[in-house]
Image (cartoon, rainbow, N blue to C red):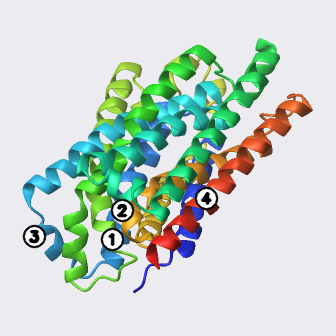
Amino acid sequence: MTPNPLLGVLFHWLGGLASASFYVPYRGVRRWSWEIFWLTGGVFSWLLAPWTIAFLQTKDLGGVMAQVPHSVAGLCVLFGVLWGFGGLTYGLTMRYLGLSLGMAVVLGLCTVFGTLIPPLVQGDFADKLLATTSGRIILLGLLITIAGIVVVALAGARKDAALSEDAKKAVIAEFDFKKGVAVAIFSGIMSACFAFGLAAGEPIKALSAAAGTGPLWTGLPVLCLVMFGGLITNGLWCGFLILRNKSAGQWMGAVSPAEVSDKPEVAALKRSPLLVNYLLCAVAGTAWYFQFFFYTMGESQMGKFGFSSWTLHMASIIIFGTVWGFALREWKDARPAVKAAVWSGVGLLILATIVIGYGNKIGAT
């Protein structure tokens, strides 16, 4: 199948929408500690969804996995473990900064590292990005993406600086700008490791294609390994928090220690809505996985400039994350000039996806 970069851009937009939306269902979870709902959703994100979808779409998944060299599998899982630190702190960033500003800071750093490091390590940065017209256009798209991220982040900072502490807490219950930015920087750098894991899994894609898997789906077995690494990191950390906070009983409807009451009738009112919580976590976790499901589909359409997919993915997440920020009224008290600034940043990101898609189209022809 001949690569179709424009179709690839569409897939990346769908992945961005899934990523920007995944945290919204978590906002509806009631009376569960963070570690409980994060790990519950994570079981769907890092284990159930990847292996189920790969089993359905990959020809002879077991046979493909049996042929994967241990060194390749180990690298994929290792980068997944490192990415897990980014994903773990990504959730904390949303708690401290909200959707709009949190995503802008995290994904800005993630875009630069995840896009540029793979071709630099492979030694073909100059040949792919500097020596060809299509490569220079893609590099221009990356620069426009970074500019759009900076504009969105600055608008978010101006919005938050103008609000009182009470106003910030009303929108984001645990708002903490300094702590949030520190966590976001770490998260952005570590999150880029996912792109490195996908690059390390290229031999697996070749094995999957040789088994007869269609080009849109050859990357799915790679996701199984990289995301398993993420499960290791998140599982260990959440397990530690569960033991420390004695919160495991919340899975069965127990009241958290902070809400224990001597009166049984009061404690009963504080029990969590278990079915609703499990369903919300399942939706959130599955949406988190689908960002990468669509990512692998989009990357399959980008031809020799597949690494530019990371920029498209990040730009799409910020675009839809900003839309969610407005929908959730995080920007309701911002001045008109600040709102105009953030939408201009979104406009730059949309322009960047068009420029990168055009550069890939030239390269494909």
Task: Say which mark, if any, is on residue 264.
Answer: none
Q: Can the viewer see residue 287 in this picture?
A: no
In the rendered image, which residue does mark 3 sit on? 67
- Image height check: is 163 above or below 31? above
Mark 3, Cα crowd under 10 Å, few <14 / some 14-19 / many 20+, is few
Q: Where is residue 185 shown, x and y percent of the image?
A: 48, 26
Residue designated by label 4:
353
- Residue type of the residue flagged with mark 3: Gln
Residue at x 32%, y 59% (from the top left corner) = 223
Q: Nearer the viewer, mark 2 or mark 3?
A: 3
Identify the amino acid type marked 4: Thr
Amino acid type assigned to the residue bearing label 1 in the image: Ala
Q: Is residue 65 visible?
A: yes
- Residue to which mark 1 is pinned: 54
Rendered view: 121 above or below 307: above
Say whether disc 4 or disc 1 marks the residue closer to the N-terminus: 1
Q: Earlier in the sequence, mark 3 or mark 4?
A: 3
Q: Secondary structure at mark 4?
A: helix
Q: Nearer the viewer, residue 36 or 160?
A: 160
Q: CA distance from mark 2 to mark 4?
A: 27 Å
Q: Residue at x 51, y 29 (%)?
A: 92
Separation (CA) of disc 1 from disc 2: 6 Å
Q: For this view, does 184 lie left or right of residue 2?
A: right
SS under mark 1? helix
Q: Which of pointers 3 and 1 lies earlier in the amino acid sequence? A: 1
Residue type pointed to by label 2: Pro
In the image, 120 versus 191, the foreground residue is 120
Residue named by callout 2: 50
